[in-house]
Amino acid sequence: MGEKKDRVAAQAEPTMNGDETTTRLELEAGLRFGHLLSMQMKQDLYDSVTQVSALIDELVSNGNLDRQLLEARYGACREREYLRIREHAYVKIAEPRGADDKANTVLIDCESRLPLCGARCCTFGVTLSAEDLDRGRVKWDYAIPYQIRQDTGGYCTHSCGGKGNGCEVYADRPGACRDYDCRKDERIWADFEGRIPAS
């Protein structure tokens, strides 16, 4: 029995000859497919709610339903359901950047400013796009798809430990990072031109 268990465990472990990368890519592809299906279900649910709302409006307009009584019952049910679904997972994926957007990448001399700002922008939550995911460079949080993965200190996992030393995937950074402009962000700078970081 122990021999069989060891054999199964060995089969589940990726080897170091490239299988680990393949396994990771397959896992990501499977998770993304599952998440896309769940979002389709969400859209179908939205369509169903819309149809029910239209039906209610029609019944009320024909005098077959008392809207005040319905809304009183709806309020109680809504509060109950809200409490029930608060912990449900939600999948977000960013819109892809168009071809024109690529020419509009914000250019800021981050390298010279990192010792001042401490890479605070790397603590912000970033939702990745399919384009970002397909590059295969940026790690995302499996528990919160498709948010960029953060370390225990709250910094992006690619930000060199949040020590202001730069980004490990700068050339392949997500679209949200390319589009971000910190110059007027009061969370980062008290005075961008004067190189005075926010307190």
Image (tube, rainbow, N blue to C red):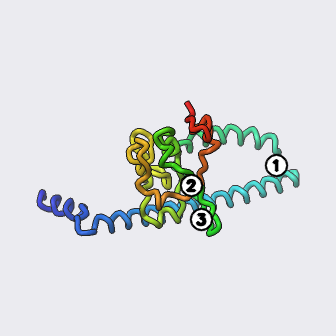
Give the foreground label among 2 and 1. Answer: 2
Q: Which residue is mark 2?
A: 176
Q: Measure the C-alpha gap from mark 2 to mark 3.
A: 11 Å
- List x then y, in percent, for residue 98: 62, 67
Secondary structure type for disc 3: helix
The part of the image, by quadrant, that contains residue 23 is bottom left
Q: Which residue is mark 1?
A: 65
First reached walking from the N terminus: tag 2 or tag 1? 1
Give the foreground label among 2 and 3. Answer: 3
Q: Amino acid at mark 3?
A: Lys
Report the number of numbered marks: 3
- List x then y, in percent, for residue 52: 73, 56
Q: Measure the C-alpha gap from mark 2 to mark 1.
A: 48 Å
Q: Residue furthest right?
A: 62
Q: Which residue is mark 3?
A: 102
- List x then y, in percent, for residue 115: 46, 40
Q: Residue at x 47, y 61 (%)?
A: 172
On screen, residue 128 versus residue 23, left or right, reads right
The answer to whether marks 3 and 1 mark residues whose Cβ atoms lie closer than 8 Å is no
On screen, residue 5 versus residue 159, left or right, reads left
Quarter of the C terminus within the rendering: top right
The part of the image, by quadrant, that contains residue 44 is bottom right
First reached walking from the N terminus: tag 3 or tag 1? 1
Q: Residue at x 81, y 44 (%)?
A: 67
